[in-house]
Amino acid sequence: MRPIILAGNWKMYKTQAEALAFLEQFLPLIAETAHQVILGVPFTSLGGLAVRLPATVHLAAQNIHWADFGAFTGEVSGPMLREVDVSHVIIGHSERRQYFGETDATVNLRLKAAQHHGLTPILCVGETKAQRDAQATEAVIFSQLEQDLVGVDQQKLIIAYEPIWAIGTGDTCATLEANRVIGLIRSRLTHSDVPIQYGGSVKPENIDEIMAQPEIDGVLVGGASLEATSFARIVNYGSVCR
Ligand code: PGA
């Protein structure tokens, strides 16, 4: 059985004080969840949150370098993340690919480094609006998977399907279409139990419909994970948030 994984991606939001205030409000709201919850937070908040999290809530970094150490200004390594009890790493997010020169080759190096250090990567794949309009969605995603997953252990992996046109736009991918693409992604994998999330304008209003889809094993949430009651409602999907 594939696990259900609800992950928040805070991107470059929240100071450490703001992160701790979020946690104080958030934890009581999700105390009864049976699902895996992951908070993907800025590096500066990892250490402070790590010592305050219950066993059901995990920490993700938003990047990892492939070397253990070295002259790589601005990067962070696996041993550094392990030291602060990080368990997951978001890799290949479209914002990294678009704004910071991330390529499938560097995504592949980061994925392997994460696994080498016992961290579970959340690999993001997805197409632009232009690629979708040109009927290239499948080709783009299959190419990303093929290059990104060389030498990667699929038994220690999470994938997030994030259509780029749906990220931060309020324009959620139709749930049946997200389910279809995620099914296609699964058909390309050698290990069919890889949890595959949907990401892109997930919010309290659409979480129940998204999670009702059989191929969708969870969500990667940006904007709606920044507010405790909103992300708690997403984690507690299918029930009313207290
Ligand atoms: P969004 O972001 O939920 O704000 O659309 C999702 C993401 O970038 O992972």
Image (tube, rainbow, N blue to C red):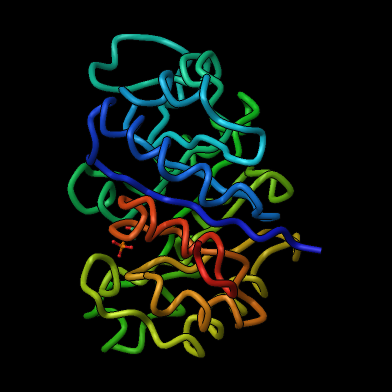
Farthest left residue in view: 99
Tell me residue 66's x, y (percent): 46, 26
Tell me if 138 is positioned left or right of 214 in this view: left
Given residues 237 and 11, the one toward you in this image is 237
Residue 172, picture quadrant: bottom left
Given residues 105 and 195, the one toward you in this image is 195
Tell me if 68 is positioned left or right of 10 in this view: right
Farthest top residue in view: 70
Farthest front residue in view: 242
Q: Is residue 5 above or below residue 114?
A: below
Query: Could you tell me which residue is drawn at 62 percent across and 67 percent down?
Result: 217
Q: Is residue 223 above or below residue 46?
A: below
Q: Quadrant of the N terminus?
A: bottom right
Query: Could you tell me which residue is drawn at 41 percent across and 42 percent down?
Result: 25
Tell me residue 199's x, y (percent): 42, 66
Tell me residue 123's x, y (percent): 49, 51
Tell me if 188 is positioned left or right of 65 in this view: right
- The quadrant where ligand 1 appears is bottom left
Q: Is residue 127 above or below residue 57?
A: below
Query: Could you tell me which residue is drawn at 54 percent across and 56 percent down?
Result: 6
Given residues 65 and 52, the one toward you in this image is 52
Query: Could you tell me which residue is drawn at 75 percent across and 60 percent down?
Result: 191
